[in-house]
Amino acid sequence: MQSYQGFEQGPIRPPSEAASLLLRVNRNCPWNRCTFCSIYKKQKFSLRPVADVLADIDLIHRYTSEIRQGRRAPDTSSPEDQAAYYAARNWLSEGMESIFLQDADSLVIRPQNLITILQHIKTRFPKVERITSYARSESVARISSEHMKEFAAAGLNRIHIGMETASDTILGMVRKGCTKAIHITAGLKVKAAGIELSEYILTGIGGSEFSREHAIESADALNQIDPDFIRFRTLHLQDKITLFANSDEYRYQWAPDLVLAEEILLLLERLEGVTSTVRSDHSYNLFQEVDGILPQDKGRLLELLRSFITMPPAERVLFQLGKRSGHFLRLGDMQIPGRRAQVAETCRAANITPDNADVWIHDMIQERMRMGMPF
Ligand code: SF4
């Protein structure tokens, strides 16, 4: 048997898992073909031995116990030990309430192996309240309902799924390896197992041309699933990437902010009978204040988007730029005189007008992506 390869963590987690311990169950993405996703592109998918995942859990348990007892930092001679020690320390400072299983799809491993991992977590950390994971709809759809219920019984209580869109046209063009029907089957299966479901919608994935179809189809799928969470992320894609790789007919045309606002508005307008919590919890989103619980907050969220859409163009530009420059977080921040004046001065100095603002912002984001900077 291969010996323990050392503690590992993967590169990403959902924003809502910032306080979670990241526990790597497998490496990278078993699909890795979505044209809009570059996270794992140069990485090969592999399974970690279950024994290694259990050893990671034991290591975190040891370090959190030792830190709690006030012992000095252990002699962390290897980089893996150091990583485990700092992961344990951070998790302890966050309250040790939740664990996120990595990487892109922990549900592709053998069901019994996942159950073994979940049970070991519960044995070592009985007070953990939440164990969550990313999963592809395609994987969930192939798992039996009985196994899903066993996952839930073993402690898995939230699954994050990147629906991105429920438009079959777009799903096909971006090589998501999934259809609207599969998204719905998977979503319903997660919910039937008693596991919380978080569905991610990728604003802008249809570009200008498919924006309405994206909104209408996605809302229809969400209406059928009624997930616990609907989370918006915004597509930011380097111009050199071919998004609609599976289409000879269509070329992706990035959508300006006004189209994206109308897209989110249409999607929310079309939601009927859902009781989801809506979040826009990514700093790259223009409208992070699209945040509420349906159905009671629907009117407020629609009003917020309409207020941006109906603004005089010069006001819209101020918000578009001020949000990207960190001066504004929400629309109401435009009324803070000092910040407003700074953004207005930037527009004046760079000659940014309603006619050129979208291209200016697009180019700025492209440049920042090239340089690996946040935007
Ligand atoms: S399934 Fe998820 S992680 Fe994998 S390539 Fe697609 S978007 Fe990226």
Image (cartoon, rainbow, N blue to C red):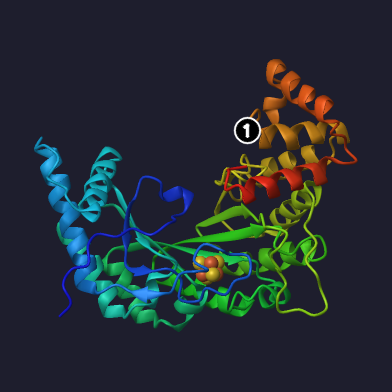
Q: Quadrant of the C terminus?
A: top right
Which residue reaches farthest right?
355
Q: Residue 305 placed where, x, y %? A: 74, 43
Label 1: element kind:
loop
Q: Residue 266 placed where, x, y %? A: 76, 55
Q: Which residue is drawn at the image coordinates 80% and 80% (left, top)? A: 248
Tell me the kind of residue under disc 1: Leu
Location of residue 216 (image quadrant)? bottom right
Up/down of 58 relative to 5, above or below: above
Does the image show residue 70?
yes
Q: Residue 279 placed where, x, y %? A: 56, 48
Up/down of 259 relative to 155, above or below: above
Q: Quadrant of the N terminus?
A: bottom left
Left-right relation of 357 to 327:
right
Up/down of 343 relative to 323, above or below: above
The total of numbered circles placed on residues is 1
Q: Which residue is drawn at the image coordinates 9% and 37% (left, top)? A: 71
| Crowding near the residue tagged with mark 1, few <14, some 14–19, many ≥20 C-alpha atoms within 10 Å | some
Give whichever of 98, 252 is nearer the camera.
252
Which residue reaches farthest top?
338
Give whichever of 35, 131 is nearer the camera.
35
The residue to which callout 1 is attached is: 329
Q: Residue 93 placed where, x, y %? A: 27, 38
Left-right relation of 42 to 221:
left
Does the image show residue 125?
no
Left-right relation of 325 to 316:
left
Location of residue 55 (image quadrant)? bottom left
Left-right relation of 355 to 244:
right
Q: Which residue is drawn at the image coordinates 38% and 73% (left, top)? A: 107
Location of residue 143 (image quadrant)? bottom left
